[in-house]
Amino acid sequence: MAGTEHVISVEELLSRKVNVVRTEAGQTSRSGNDGSRIEVQVIEKDSPRQQWLDELEKAGDEAADQKTGPKIQKVPFLLRDHKDAAKYFEPRVVSLGPIHHGKPKYRKAEKYKLVLANKFVKESGKDKKAESLYAEIEKKIKKLREYFDDDEEVMKNYDDEYLARMLFVDGCAVLQFMYYAVEDKFKDVKIKDDQAAFGQEDLFLLENQLPYQLLEDLMELSEKKEILKKSIERFIGRHATFDKKNDMPATKGDKPAPHLLDRLRTRLLIGGKSDSSGGQKWQAGWNSYRNVQELREVGIKLKPSKTSSLTDVSFDKRYPGHLYLPQITPALDDSTGPNFLNLVAYEMCPDFENDFGVTSYICFLDSLIDHPEDVKELRKELILHNLLGSDKEVAKLFNDIATDLAPNPNAYADVKKQIQDCYDNKWKTWIAQGIHDHFSSPWTGVGFAAAFVALFLTAAQTWFTVFSSPGPCDNFCQHHRG
């Protein structure tokens, strides 16, 4: 009917010849062959709805095509709510990379980075100049940019040239810093010990990482390449003792390590005996024991493992039962909390596929530590060394950093089950409690022995009195013989 206004479907629209006239708000007025006026909603390409649909479809494609390793990024939001987030996750003296770059509190450290970078260039070779070394990094800046999370708003603040300059100075400074740290040469650049100590902590923060590929590229440009590589090994070794003599590889299969924090994690977990992906399944949270003291009361003793790998946790169920734990090296100090929590943050990054090895270890250790007495027992067995101060501070540290963490439910599954089985064994418990009550110290042992001897002597005296004195029958026989 002429003059009728109606809205038609896409199929009807395609089946008819219409003249389209664009109107406001993305709506079009169309005239059909019969002269009717047809209104149909046309979605603009740049409209919010179309953008949303495009992003929805693109997100699936990106998830399927993602081939890169974990990116350098901010700490996951689940940890940013931690009450001590600034203490654990933000640099104390020096910023590295783009995330904290330019903040006023790190301005003083910028001159030290320039001094260290200058030393690196001068020690790279007689014919090496800063300009030629920088040019090589500048050529690779687009590739280096890919190691950072491009979703981070901060990356949009730096063009390629500025980012290349930043990474060149930071990379040179980090390599020279690690070399000076292991060779004890900070006095050459007038860096004091306290500044160096805080600087070492800052090198293992998730938000302060540099692409390891950058360090590799810079070492290739230096005549001290092998010395610098050894320096990295020794530097990481100070933060995680490794028991094997062979150097830890900088690659995992065909993939290079993304950054120094990843290499620290590998060092902490390599070489041990892990049952995180196999063994008997034990439902998380079912264990009824609460801490080291409760294990000790049922006779379970703590012993240091043969290696310091965090996966080297085992249980020997032969009486009285021994739980073997890796020694925490180096000693616990102010860097322990930041190191562990940044490793946890790294394991929580959505683009890092892993078995939550460090997270699971922290949660397992936290399940054994409730009170200072638990820490004291761990110290006594040389499983940890405390430089934090009191044992109460160590207990608080692990209780704090383990809050709201989600470990791999299969981590240490077989060990947990064996501990629980031993804990539930009643006759072992009775024997252990008897030994604990009567022989827990030399004085209680002496007291128990004295009481036992006194009881024995009393019994012997009674027996001697009863059986050595003449009875009525003996007196009758003696009378008649007389």
Image (cartoon, rainbow, N blue to C red):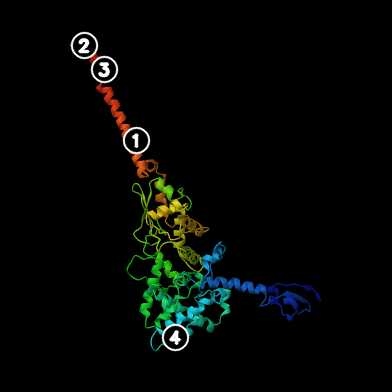
Query: Label 4 neighbourhood size at 10 Å, few (<14), some (14-19), many (20+)?
Result: some
Given contact means CB atoms under 8 Å apart, are the residues at marks 1 and 4 in contact? no
Q: Which residue is mark 4?
A: 133
> Which comes before the other along the chain, label 4 or label 2?
4
Checking the image for residue 240, the label placed there is: none
Q: Earlier in the sequence, mark 3 or mark 1?
A: 1
Quarter of the image with the C terminus is: top left
Query: What amino acid type is highlighted by mark number 1?
Result: Ala
Q: Nearer the viewer, mark 1 or mark 4?
A: 1
**Furthest residue to the left?**
481
Res. 281 visible in picture? no
Q: Amino acid at mark 4?
A: Leu
Q: CA distance from mark 1 to mark 4?
A: 82 Å
Q: Which residue is mark 3?
A: 471
The residue at 66%/72% (across/down) is 49
- Mark-to-mark CA distance, 3 and 1: 32 Å
Q: CA distance from mark 4 to mark 3?
A: 112 Å
Task: Identify residue for label 2.
Answer: 479
Q: CA distance from mark 2 to mark 3?
A: 13 Å
Residue pointed to by mark 1: 451
Q: Residue furthest right?
A: 3
Callout 2: SS = helix
